[in-house]
Image (cartoon, grey):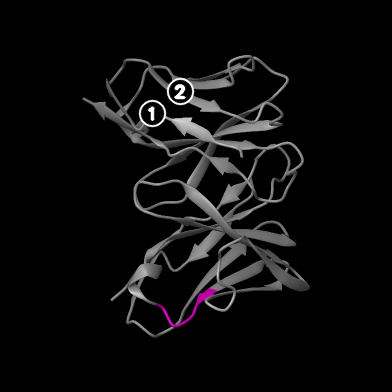
Amino acid sequence: GEDVEQSLFLSVREGDSSVINCTYTDSSSTYLYWYKQEPGAGLQLLTYIFSNMDMKQDQRLTVLLNKKDKHLSLRIADTQTGDSAIYFCAEIPYGSGNTGKLIFGQGTTLQVKP
Amino acid sequence: GAVVSQHPSWVICKSGTSVKIECRSLDFQATTMFWYRQFPKQSLMLMATSNEGSKATYEQGVEKDKFLINHASLTLSTLTVTSAHPEDSSFYICSAPPTGDYGYTFGSGTRLTVV
């Protein structure tokens, strides 16, 4: 079945760049998302990328998609303490449409040290 | 963008009681809402899909009688945890389907603790 894997923890210093990685198994995924979850809160959509794109940039966020390796990454430039949170990548498998069947990774806890 | 309001944010209840969690779409109509469960330090698992005007669709392994889902209107979906037990303690999050470029919109979540 579909599976999404992430590293569990990343620690960076304020001002550095953060790169959070994600691998997935379903090569026919249509959309891939990055969500941010702060403690005790719901999920905030950060950005998404269509499967026919290689890169997407949105202010401090850069998403890279390597379809051959089924690898997705999120780069946060000039990381701030407010970026400390759990980051989830998620995919919509082909055919799932709007069924809600997002497949989530385990989440990467980003710790930003002052 | 689309906003989903979820209440309560946290609730503590005694074993055997029932708890209702509400999820409202504030600035749009949602004929469908999704309910997820998240265990500590784990990812989200889709529990069920509520459908306005019809029965909810449950994922495999989810007890329909324990987790009652109702989609009362185009802006309100509820999840009722019946006869709650400590193992039902978890973080429950609702979401609405994508609207425009906003992707799936999630509520703020409800932390349920059953004592």
Residue found 65% across the figure and 40% down from its top: B102
Q: Answer few, some or many: residues within 10 Å of disc 2's Cα (few below 14, many 20 plus, some between 14 and 19).
A: many
Residue B103 in the image: state x and y as whole percent. 65, 41
Q: Amino acid at mark 2?
A: Asn
Per the rendering, the mark at residue B113 is none
Q: Amino acid at mark 1?
A: Ser
Per the rendering, the mark at residue A7 is 1
What residue did someone put label 2 on? A21
Check if mark 2's residue and mark 1's residue have beta carbons within 8 Å.
yes
Left/right placement of residue A25 relative to residue B12 reads right
Image position of B104 with respect to B112: above or below: above
Image position of B66 with respect to A6: above or below: below
Q: Which residues are magenta?
A: B80-84
SS at circle 1: loop
For the residues beneath circles 2 and 1, the answer to whether they share a chain is yes
SS at circle 2: strand
Q: Quadrant of residue A79?
A: top left
Queried whether the magenta region covers residue B65, the answer comes back as no
Taking depth in this image into account, of A67 and A78 the one nearest to the observer is: A67
Residue A62 in the image: state x and y as whole percent. 53, 18
Residue found 52% across the figure and 77% down from its top: B66
Residue found 33% across the figure and 72% down from its top: B86
Residue furthest to the front in view is A1
